[in-house]
């Protein structure tokens, strides 16, 4: 991974240094002796290379110097300026020289990118841990999504079943209501018919049709509850008081009303709740 950032920076630096040296020698060679032009070109490339080496040394130690960085960029801009000036003064191929004038600045930018990569690089162990955490998060998210989909499907199935059951109940109630309505109409028509009185007269005592007893339709709807009948012969008040007193005092301490009432009915005696409570009050 480190070679992916350092190799382009090294290649761009080498190309820009060769171009700078060549341009300085060709440009200044006409005005000064070529050894002088060569020294100038090597000075620009050497200064750039020296600041770059020192900057890389500081980066390896985890340090950073703004002054060194500024000097390095100054040499890079100087090299780029030389290339631009040569391109503007060249009599031929000015466009080609101007097209490569940005290479020194691009080389410095590539070294900046490489430095950022080094400051943010992680060890293989840390990268493996990060991948494991990300994979675990993806697994949990997938399980959560599957659970939500399953719950949604279950709820949809339940609602569909409840709706179908409700629809079936509604259809049964509708059919039952229609059947009861037809039966009620039949009963009412039979009661109000012209021959109903004569039919009732024929099965009861002889009366005229105009005074025959009128039978009522069966009740369709809520009805009043019928009070429960006493299962045995009714006791007189004196006998009821005697039985209540015997049961109440059968244990020490005396029984409560609820216990006495339970044993009273378990013994087979019959009395309404009102009479039984009245007898309890009398004996107590």
Image (tube, helix red, strand yellow):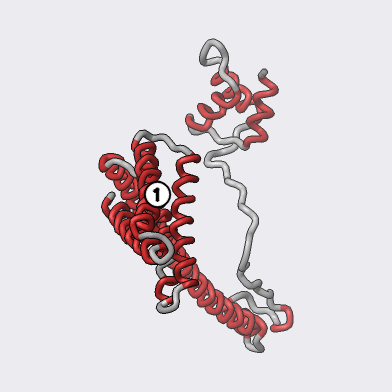
Is residue 88 found left or right of 218 in the rendered image? left
Q: Is residue 223 left or right of residue 252?
A: right
Judge whether 156 appears above or below 68 on screen.
below
Q: Residue furthest bottom?
A: 194
Q: Is residue 128 visible?
A: yes
**Of 271 and 63, which appears nearest the observer?**
63
Residue occupying image coordinates x 37% and y 44%: 50
Q: Residue placed at 58% from the left, 46% from the top?
A: 228
Q: Report if residue 137 is visible in the image.
A: no
Please tell me in which quadrant of the rendered image residue 248 appears: top right
The location of residue 260, given as percent across then percent down, is 56, 24
Which of the image's four quarters has the C terminus?
Answer: top right
The foreground one among 192 and 104 is 104
Q: Residue at x 52, y 29 (%)?
A: 262
Label 1 crowd bin: few (<14), some (14–19), many (20+), radius 10 Å: many
The answer to which of 258 and 93 lies nearer the viewer is 93
The tally of labels here is: 1
**Callout 1: helix, strand or loop?**
helix
- The residue under the point 38% across, 37% down is 58
The furthest residue to the top: 252
- Where does residue 178 sit, x and y in percent of width and height? 55, 79
Which residue occupies the foreground of this view, 39 or 227? 39
Q: Which residue is mark 1?
A: 48
User: Where on the picture, by quarter, is residue 193?
Assistant: bottom right
Rendering coords of residue 22 (x, y %)? 34, 63
Compared with 59, 101 (above or below) is below
């Amino acid at each position: 991974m480190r070679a992916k950032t350092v190799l382009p920076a090294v290649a761009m630096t080498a190309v820009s240094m060769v171009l700078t040296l060549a341009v300085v020698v060709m440009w200044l060679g006409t005005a000064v002796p070529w050894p002088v032009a060569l020294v100038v070109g090597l000075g620009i490339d050497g200064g750039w290379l020296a600041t770059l080496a020192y900057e890389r040394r500081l980066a390896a130690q985890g340090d950073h110097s703004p002054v060194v960085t500024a000097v390095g960029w100054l040499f890079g801009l100087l090299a780029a300026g030389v290339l631009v000036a040569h391109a503007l003064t060249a009599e031929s191929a000015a466009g080609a020289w101007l097209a490569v004038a940005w290479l020194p600045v691009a080389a410095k930018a590539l070294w900046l990118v490489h430095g950022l990569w080094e400051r943010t690089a992680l060890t293989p162990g840390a990268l493996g841990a990060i991948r494991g955490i990300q994979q675990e998060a993806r697994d949990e998210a997938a399980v959560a999504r599957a659970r939500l989909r399953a719950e949604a499907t279950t709820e949809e199935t339940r609602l569909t079943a409840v709706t179908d059951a409700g629809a079936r109940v509604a259809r049964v109630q509708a059919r039952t209501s229609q059947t009861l309505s037809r039966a009620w109409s039949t009963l009412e028509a039979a009661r109000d018919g012209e021959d109903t009185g004569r039919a009732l007269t024929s099965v009861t005592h002889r009366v005229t049709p105009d005074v025959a007893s009128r039978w009522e339709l069966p009740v369709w709807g809520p009805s009043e509850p019928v009070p429960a009948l006493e299962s045995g012969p009714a006791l007189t008040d004196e006998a009821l008081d005697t039985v209540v007193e015997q049961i109440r005092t059968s244990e020490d301490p005396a029984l409560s009303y609820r216990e006495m009432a339970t044993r009273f009915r378990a013994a087979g005696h019959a009395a309404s709740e009102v009479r039984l409570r009245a007898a309890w009050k009398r004996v107590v």
